[in-house]
Amino acid sequence: MGSKYTNRYSDEYKRDTIELMRSSGRTVTEVARELGVSSESLRGWVKKASAAQDTGSVPAAGRAGQSAADRDEELKRLRKLTAEQAKTIEILKKATLDSTGQSNRAGSGRYTWRDWVDRGCRTR
């Protein structure tokens, strides 16, 4: 037989508690303490709700909550962010070049700083 605590909280109470936690921006522990619920129970409810949402058991309109225009705008924003990050990576790659214009990375045929010190050369 099941535990006497199996149906202690209704599904509606669990949904409301999860929504409170998500909308308030507070941690699971803070909300659980305020409501007198075990933080591990609340954490489990949130995990189950997220898994159910990810598998698509919630209707698409309720899950996404976005129109096609909103999704297109988000996609445009993410593509712009990706392009900016690619530029940043390229700048950082160029910044790794030493004064002779050769890469200071391993396997480049140049001595690394550690090799220089190990050979007994002084830095000053």
Image (cartoon, rainbow, N blue to C red):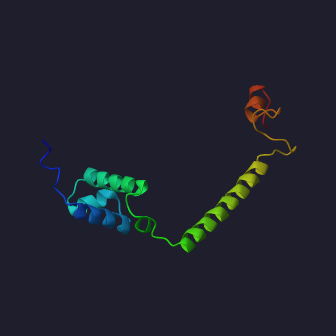
The correct choice, above or below, for 119 with respect to 54 in the image is: above
Asked where in the image residue 27 lies, by quadrant, the reply is bottom left
- Image spot of residue 45 (x, y percent): 30, 54
Q: Residue at the location (34% across, 56% down)?
A: 49
Which of the two residues, 45 or 62, is positioned nearer the viewer here? 62
Image mark count: 0
The quadrant the C terminus occupies is top right
Left or right: 56 as drawn, with respect to 110: left
**Residue at 78% across, 26% down:** 120
Q: Nearer the viewer, residue 44 or 103?
A: 44
Q: Residue furthest top?
A: 119
Residue in the image at 43% along x and 68% along y: 61
Q: Give residue 14's quadrant in the image.
A: bottom left
The residue closer to the viewer here, 40 or 106, is 40
Apparent side of residue 124 relative to residue 35 in the rendered image (left or right): right
- x and y percentages locating residue 31 in the rendered image: 28, 62
Residue 12 position, x and y percent, is 24, 64
Vertical side of 47 occupied by 14: above or below: below
Q: Residue at 17% across / 50% down in the picture?
A: 6
Camera-side residue of 1 and 30:
1
Q: Quadrant of the N terminus?
A: top left
Which residue in the rendered view is the most extreme toward the right? 100
Residue 67 lies left or right of residue 13; in this view the side is: right
**x, y (%) of residue 113?**
75, 35
The quarter of the displayed image where residue 73 is located? bottom right
